[in-house]
Amino acid sequence: MATTLDATAIDAPTLAARMSTLGTETAFEVLARAGQLAAQGKDIINLGIGQPDFRTPDHIVEAACKALRDGHHGYTPAAGIPALREAVAADIQRRHGVGIDPGQVLIVPGGKVTMFFVAMLYGEPGVEIMYPNPGFPIYESVIRFSGATPVPIPLLEENGFAFSAEDVLSRITPKTRLIMLNSPANPTGGAVPKEEMDKLVKGLLDHPTVTIMSDEIYGQMLYDGRQHVSMLSYPEIRDRVILLDGWSKTYAMTGWRLGYSVWPKAVLPHAEKLAVNCHSCVNAATQYAGIAALTGPQDAVHAMVKAFDERRRVIVSELNQIPGFRCVEPGGAFYAFPNVEGTGIATKQLQTRLLEEAGVAVIAGTSFGKYGEGYLRFSYANSTENIREAMARIRRLLSA
């Protein structure tokens, strides 16, 4: 006789206590809800997800196809194929004027892997790790998961959401082991001026045991003549800088899951050991696509940045015409981060109303930390037509 299993009688699994400290990324939750509404027939304009709305350039796609046709179907070295690591080193030399050993490069499946590895290598109970707030939510999540104490670096509207070197340095304590930085930044679009970077580096000389993880994934998306300043370009601290970068944003390759990090020589073997335990290696064909992206024509990159700049101007102008909104002009990335306190509506509630009632997907600033209260993140990785329509919908909703 068959036995019926009573699901209510099954005890919940006992998980490690640290799982309760692990956060998530709200952008994917909003994306899922937007997808549900779209499936029900609702017209949704998605200004929530942070990914380019362009196709990966054809020559990059073809390089992956060729790699598959040529039989690159097996494992690769855990740190990445040598030709790709060499291409990364050459690209860093070209863009930043910094010579690095390709042996310091670790190829990984996306940017989050580097964040996780850094947290695992440096974080433990009793340690403090600083991170930007509002900032990419995975920073705080992996810091807490490591057992370390997250210490927020407030990014303020009056500073264009760029950190103050003096403020960062003032928060360093004997427990500080790592500082995570991000410029140009998600979710604010803030870009840190060179003079602040210079001040920070000068001050860090007084704290020789503090390591810096510099997330520069948006480093090629700057506007109004701004120039990107890489933390690798400061030789006096280079032996304690970890660079996070990759292909997702610059080359419209979010779904390819391809990123890289540059490590101090003494730390790279430990990061590589984590890679072996975590994912073995990045898939081979994607790595050949990465080589084509770095060594091939850059016309598509420049065209995308030009389009983002045009959309940036449109969305900032439109946001500043919405009653209760005010928006500083972002210096980089493809996000606008308007202050919406003037609407009198709580940020999370406004996020929900815009999606459910106006059909516009955005992300509440609180998803990026406590200093995001009173703000919304808009991704302008969408067409100008859709951006204008989204703004019109928001105006209609708030004036009803």
Image (cartoon, grey):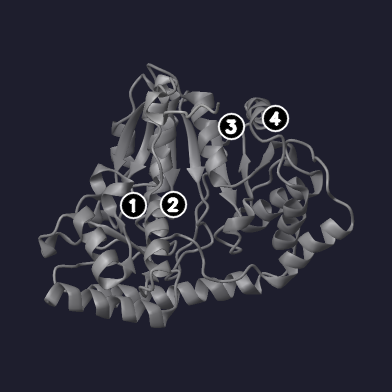
Name the residue that disc number 3 marks: 239
Q: Residues within 10 Å of mark 2 (few under 14, many from 20)?
A: many
Callouts 1 and 2 close, C-beta under 8 Å: yes
Name the residue that disc number 2 marks: 183
Callouts 2 and 4 close, C-beta under 8 Å: no
Residue type for callout 1? Ala
Check residue 162 in the rendering and tell me which mark sits there, or answer none. 1
User: How far across and down, in percent of the image, does residue 46 sit?
Assistant: 39, 68
Q: Is residue 128 above or below residue 25?
A: above
Q: Residue at x 80, y 40 (%)?
A: 75
Check residue 276 in the rendering and tell me which mark sits there, or answer none. 4
Residue type for callout 2? Ser
Q: Nearer the viewer, mark 3 or mark 2?
A: 2
Q: Residues within 10 Å of mark 1 (few under 14, many from 20)?
A: many
Q: Is residue 311 above or below residue 96?
A: below
Q: Residue furthest bottom?
A: 385
Q: Is residue 316 above or below residue 371?
A: below
Which quarter of the rendering shows the C terminus? bottom left
Q: Residue at x 57, y 76 (%)?
A: 303
**Residue placed most toward the observer, 18 or 56:** 18
User: How far across and down, in percent of the image, does residue 103 sit?
Assistant: 74, 37
